[in-house]
């Protein structure tokens, strides 16, 4: 049984994610105790109350109980997993880092509230800028002596991986792709692969890289609001692979130990091997040519610049 809190539960991404959580698409063998958190505003409270009624009506076999909250201290109590979706969303013309000032307050407060969760709580940050919001959680825990393990604080770069693989397959008419992501979930992210054919295709195609880097903005421009279903689906894939393991290389934002010259304690996307039972390893023996090293350095500069703005 897992107690799972979803923040920003009144919003679109959460409301797409929650059915995946309750219908067994993520944890088919686990019962779920659901804790829904959003801000203390009338529209959000009404949304949460309505959502609760609908979830009861869905009669999901795995869903045991639902509670709604406007206080993170209450919402996080005894949680095994917290999915941080709540935050101000990006609008046309904004970069994800423009949200740092608004969303960092939320993450500083929620970092402190982690004291109420289980000590081995698993955290996935979806709200942007997700890498640096996850770093805020990590720094708040460190500063306040919370025993949350740093390897349990992660951010979502799986959306970029899923996008890159989906767009690659569509563009090159291939059935399979294995691409992974370095760095920040930003317009500086860098895509890579261990497959020689795919490597040739993507190294010679700057437009492909740019398409992935700017896909979030493309969606915002086309529909007027940010991605929903693909973000929820990527969060599902991230949690499922982290929990049960995966044969393929996956991308996850994790607290850096300094591998590949990515500063220790930045939260960056790395190529990851998930080995099951909530364990993972950064894949350490990937050979990088000078061109790739330069691109990763750019990602690091991006993350450093975001990190320099946080105060915990
Ligand atoms: C995305 O990449 O689609 C999301 O992170 C939303 C955004 O701001 O781009």
Image (tube, rainbow, N blue to C red):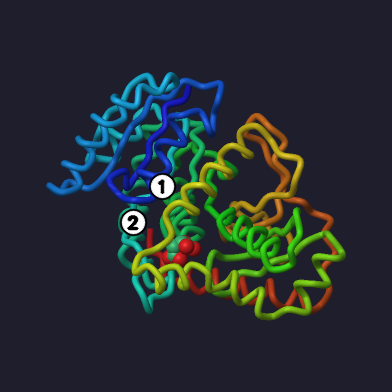
Neighbours of disc 1 within 10 Å: few (<14), some (14-19), many (20+): many
Describe the element under mark 1 as helix, strand or loop.
strand
User: Looking at this view, is 154 or 164 the one in front?
Assistant: 164
Q: Which mark is residue 118?
A: none
The residue sitting at 12% across, 47% down in the picture is 42
The residue sitting at 47% across, 72% down in the picture is 218
Q: How far is mark 1 from mark 2, CA to CA?
A: 8 Å
Q: Position of residue 95 (x, y in %)?
A: 43, 74
Label 2, ligand 1: CB separation under 8 Å: no
Provide the residue designation for mark 2.
Answer: 87
Q: Position of residue 232 (x, y in %)?
A: 46, 48
Neighbours of disc 2 within 10 Å: few (<14), some (14-19), many (20+): many
Instruction: Write down the quadrant of residue 311 in the picture.
Output: bottom left
- Tell me if residue 107 can be seen: yes
Provide the residue designation for mark 1.
Answer: 84
Q: In the picture provided, is 15 more to the left or to the right than 180? A: left
Instruction: Write down the quadrant of residue 9 in the picture.
Output: top left
Q: Quadrant of the C terminus?
A: bottom left
Pointer 1 and pointer 2: residues touching (CB < 8 Å)?
Answer: yes
Question: Eyeballing the image, is 18 above or below 181?
Answer: above
Q: Position of residue 77 (x, y in %)?
A: 34, 29
Question: Eyeballing the image, is 123 above or below 127?
Answer: above
The residue sitting at 51% across, 59% down in the picture is 131
């Amino acid at each position: 049984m897992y107690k799972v809190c979803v923040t920003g539960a009144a919003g679109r991404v959460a409301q797409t994610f929650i059915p995946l959580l309750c219908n067994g698409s993520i944890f088919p063998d686990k019962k779920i105790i659901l804790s829904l958190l959003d801000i203390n505003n009338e529209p959000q409270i009404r949304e949460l109350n309505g959502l609760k009624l609908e979830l009861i009506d869905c009669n999901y076999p795995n869903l045991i109980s639902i509670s709604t909250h406007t206080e993170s201290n209450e919402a996080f109590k005894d949680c095994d997993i917290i999915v941080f979706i709540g935050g101000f969303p990006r609008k046309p013309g904004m970069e994800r880092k423009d949200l740092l000032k608004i969303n960092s307050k939320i993450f500083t407060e929620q970092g402190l509230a982690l004291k109420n969760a289980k000590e081995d709580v698993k955290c996935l940050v979806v709200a942007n800028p997700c890498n640096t919001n996850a770093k805020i959680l990590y720094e708040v825990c460190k500063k306040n002596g919370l025993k949350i393990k740093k390897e349990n604080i992660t951010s979502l770069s799986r959306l970029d991986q899923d996008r890159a693989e989906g767009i690659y397959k569509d563009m090159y008419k291939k059935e399979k792709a294995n691409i992974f992501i370095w760095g920040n979930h930003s317009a500086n992210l860098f895509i890579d692969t261990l497959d020689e054919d795919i490597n040739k295709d993507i190294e010679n195609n700057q437009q492909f890289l740019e398409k992935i880097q700017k896909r979030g903005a493309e969606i915002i421009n086309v529909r007027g609001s940010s991605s929903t279903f693909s973000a929820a689906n990527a969060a599902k894939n991230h949690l499922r692979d982290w929990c049960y393991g995966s044969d393929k290389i996956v991308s996850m934002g994790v607290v850096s130990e300094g591998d590949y010259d990515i500063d220790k304690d930045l939260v960056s996307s790395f190529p990851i091997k998930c080995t099951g039972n909530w364990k993972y390893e950064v894949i350490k023996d990937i050979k990088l040519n000078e061109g790739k090293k330069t691109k990763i350095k750019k990602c690091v500069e991006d993350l450093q610049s975001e990190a320099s703005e946080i105060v915990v």
